Amino acid sequence: MIRTYETVFITLPTLTDDEEKVVVDALTAVVNDGGGVFAANDRMGRRRLAYPIKKFEDGVYTRFLYDSDAGVPKELDRRLRISDKVIRHMTVSMELDWAIASKEQAVRDAQARVEAEAARAAGLLTDEAARVASLLTDVSDAPPAGARDEDDIDFDDQN
């Protein structure tokens, strides 16, 4: 059965851009080779960690949003666990309503990035203004219909 999955992983902050690209491309190939279809492959950038992990204070975040069967996230998880360049990762299977909302948001984000890049190329925006404009999208505070609040989750059933 095809489901929507979101995988977020943090790579070492000491990697060069080329080394990071090699890691991300290898993980992208796992999804593509397994028959997965990407809705989003976002480099979220270097961010400060909430607490030190392996003596690192920050890391480079990357997010995959993809549709696939259950074997793909298992293989991706295996590869992420054995990689010495990835310090943390998490994969979640998304409920249908959240998956639809996330895919729509990914499309809006991509359109905003394209528009900001076009405006920057035309000389209408400075580099910093283009970066800020690409980050701004319509984000709704309300969860999609049928989504559950954290209060509705019974944590005893998940162990």
Image (cartoon, rainbow, N blue to C red):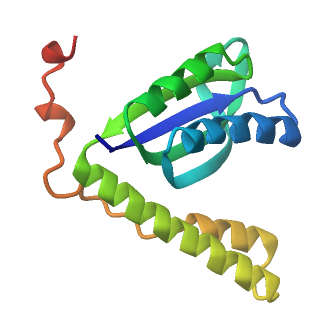
- Residue 20's place in the image compared with 132, above or below, is above
Number of labelled discs? 0
Residue drawn 67% across and 77% down?
116
Q: Where in the figure is residue 25, as x and y percent of width and height?
A: 72, 41
**Residue 63 as seen in the image, left or right of residue 143:** right
The quadrant in which residue 141 appears is: bottom left
- Residue 92's place in the image compared with 21, above or below, is above
Residue drawn 71% across and 73% down?
130
Q: Where in the figure is residue 110, as x and y percent of width and height?
A: 56, 68
In the foreground, 28 or 153: 28
Q: Where in the figure is residue 150, as x and y percent of width and height?
A: 21, 34
In the rendered image, the quadrant that contains the N terminus is top left
The quadrant in which residue 114 appears is: bottom right
**Residue 141 as seen in the image, left or right of residue 133:** left
Residue drawn 49% across and 45% down?
36
**Residue 112 as seen in the image, left or right of residue 95:** right
Q: Where in the figure is residue 62, as x and y percent of width and height?
A: 62, 41
Residue drawn 37% across and 31% down?
70
In the rendered image, the quadrant that contains the C terminus is top left
- Residue 131's place in the image compared with 56, above or below, is below
